[in-house]
Image: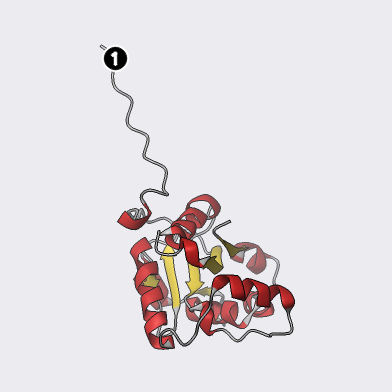
């Protein structure tokens, strides 16, 4: 195991059709998911904000793939596995989604409860060291890497999103993890 990830599929269209407020669904999960909602959607209408449509371009569907966590163990860092994970999540799990979104935040700066043994053991494995760099530096570095996949920063916080209808190139650092393209069939003569 090189790490772990977590992602959510939020069926915006079904929420709206059933009269369920999207803000309630996203707020119930976490403050980070609520921030993604507030950044992307108009709370009065549950429609994408105008600036989001302008930044992302073609967004044919409102459903969202939200990537909530990607953690790579220290011995596997620097190989592009984190970016490849995000790329793969989008490629394989964004069907019927118009947007892939995330809240970029370096997890070494998240407050952990030491009373939770599972998280303490995992945190030890992860080698989190909040003193190794500043939060601002780590945050901007993370955003810089995520933007290589075509994500755009929305607003002033760490919310990034991309339209899943856009064909984004595979960054050089993850080409070894991405399946090669199938060459076109040659015509037989």
Q: Residue 126, image x and y in percent? A: 56, 71
Please give the name of the residue rendered at 44% of the width and 69% of the height, measured from the top-left corner: 161
Horizontally, is 59 left or right of 126 in the view? left
- Relative to 87, does residue 122 appear above or below in the rendering? below
Q: Secondary structure at mark 1?
A: loop
Rendered residue at 28%/19% (across/down): 187
86 and 135: which one is in front?
Answer: 135
Is the residue 42 above or below the residue 185 in the image? Answer: below
Looking at the rendered image, the quarter that the C terminus falls into is: top left
22 or 76: which is nearer to us? 76
Q: Which residue ends up furthest to the left in the rendered image?
A: 189
For residue 28, side relative to residue 152 (left or right): right
Q: Is residue 89 left or right of residue 141?
A: right
Left or right position of 126 against 84: right
Q: Name the quadrant of the N terminus.
A: bottom right
Residue nearest the observer in this picture, 88 or 156 = 88
Residue beneath disc 1: 188
Q: Horizontal and vertical percent for residue 168?
A: 35, 56
Where is residue 136, by image quadrant? bottom left
**Relative vertical location of residue 159 with respect to residue 78 in this rendering, above or below:** below
Residue 54 can be seen, yes or no:
no
Q: Horizontal and vertical percent for residue 135?
A: 44, 87
């Amino acid at each position: 195991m090189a790490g772990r990830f977590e992602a959510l599929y939020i069926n915006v269209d079904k929420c709206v059709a059933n009269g369920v407020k999207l803000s309630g669904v996203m707020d119930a999960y976490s403050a980070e998911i609520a921030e993604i909602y507030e950044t992307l959607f108009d709370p009065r209408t549950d429609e994408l904000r105008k600036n989001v449509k302008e930044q992302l371009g073609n967004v044919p569907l409102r459903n969202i793939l939200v990537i909530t966590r990607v953690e790579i163990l220290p011995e596997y860092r620097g190989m592009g596995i984190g970016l490849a994970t995000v790329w793969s999540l989008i490629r394989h799990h964004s069907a019927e989604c118009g947007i892939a979104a995330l809240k970029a935040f370096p997890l070494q700066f998240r407050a952990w409860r030491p009373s939770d043994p599972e998280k303490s053991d995992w945190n030890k494995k992860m080698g989190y060291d909040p003193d190794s760099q500043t939060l601002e530096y780590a945050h901007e570095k993370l955003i810089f890497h995520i933007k290589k996949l075509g994500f755009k920063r929305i607003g002033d916080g760490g919310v990034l999103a991309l339209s899943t209808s856009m064909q984004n190139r595979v960054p050089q650092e993850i080409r070894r993890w991405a399946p090669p393209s199938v060459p076109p069939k040659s015509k037989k003569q």
